[in-house]
Amino acid sequence: MTQDPVVTALTAALAAGDSLPLRMALGDHLARTSRHAEALAQYEAALLIDPSNSDVLAAAALMAGELGDTAKASTYRMLIDHQPARTTVRPISSPPPSPVSPSPPSALPPRAEIAHKGPRLVTSDGELLEIEDTPSITFKDVAGMVEVKERLNRSFLQALKNPELFRKYGKTVGGGLILYGPPGCGKTYLARALAGELQARFLNIGLSDVLDMWFGEAERKLHVLFENARRMAPVVVFFDEVDALGLKRSKMSGSVGRNLVNQFLAEMDGVQSRNEGLFFLGATNHPWDIDTALRRPGRFDRMLFVTPPDLEARHTLLQLSLEAKPVVPEIDLAPIARATEGFSGADMVAVVSEALELAISASLTSGREVPVDTKLLQQALRACRASTRPWFDTARNYAIYANEGGTFDDMLSYMKNHGIA
């Protein structure tokens, strides 16, 4: 097969230095010669350079349509619609319809027929990532955690409600905060409740949304996610298990993980400029593993200890878990709440689940419905243990011997007050 000299020349130029105009020129030439898949690959590579470019998005939508990938084409069209300022879309020369791709660009489904639950973000490999519309839960749906909610109110809610006042004092509307503590204590639920209070969208980014087997792709995916989130502001960007993305570079032996952390740091630096209206929340069970550079001012500059539920919260969790279940009238939950000191929210749900299983077993044995009572809950409690104990055993050494700059003061205070330290 004769080598296309235009493709050869543009490919050589790209090897010398990647750029948006070169990617677009190569993509347009490939499109005109009916090499649709290769053209789409070039347009998607161009989106990694400028994810918000309407010209590139339109070209990518056109090529996806030529290939019969209406879902991807619809996504690119949707992203154009969500541009804060529409630009004139540059048409490219459309090649004649291919015998294997009979659907012309006009056959793309209209916007009214594109069904989805809410806005979605497109990653660098064309996959879709749901961005949840404003969550229906708020702080009133979170049992206990009074101090934690007050801290979040000072750090986030007041800024959103009084933006002009904060700007006068040189404070941006947004920022970053890490929620840390033992597993099962409601860090993710609390993040969603914050989004509900802010009346902001909620984007949950996990490790699987970023990591890729190809060198450099993880960093590119992270950049695309940040760029799309900026267009969706205000939005709460939640990084679950943030230590997996921002692990201390001193613990890494290769360059791949370090490059990802470096990219993460670069994106977080936008907090002072382009990240206005983005509220970054991270959650982790291992705060001591997070790279210290991620915790400097302007990035995740605040850390908040999410404690196991207190007495009032444990009582409320028991009530909520038993709601609409067969329960004896006026059941006394106070002794169970008192006996579950140190239990996480997930542990409390597990106690109720165990009691329900005991009630079902008793009902099958007796042939009648046996409701849950305090005695059954106490029996269930004997089969359950606080999952937070092993976590505190590990955390104790970090709180005492690795508390640089008072990072873990809140955790240390809690441990001393509860006889753990």
Image (cartoon, rainbow, N blue to C red):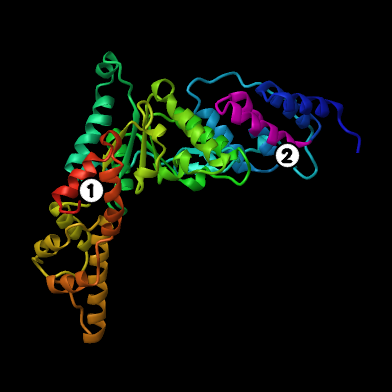
Residue located farthest toward the top when viewing the structure as drawn: 168
Instruction: Classify 100 as above or below 96.
Output: below
| Kind of residue sitting beneath label 2 | Ala
The residue positioned 34% from the left and 29% from the top of the image is 175
Residue 186 visible to an observer of this rendering: no
Dot 1 lies on which element?
A: loop
Mark 2 and mark 1: Cα distance apart in space: 52 Å
Find residue 324 and report its horizontal and vertical position in percent.
Answer: 21, 63
The residue positioned 26% from the left and 70% from the top of the image is 354
Q: Does residue 268 belong to the magenta stretch?
A: no
| Kind of residue sitting beneath label 1 | Thr
The residue tagged 1 is 307
Majority SS type along the magenta span: helix
Closest to the observer, 14 or 258: 258
Q: Does residue 58 belong to the magenta stretch?
A: yes
Magenta residues, as a range?
35-59
Q: In this view, does 419 lie to the left or right of 15?
A: left
> Residue 37: which disc?
2
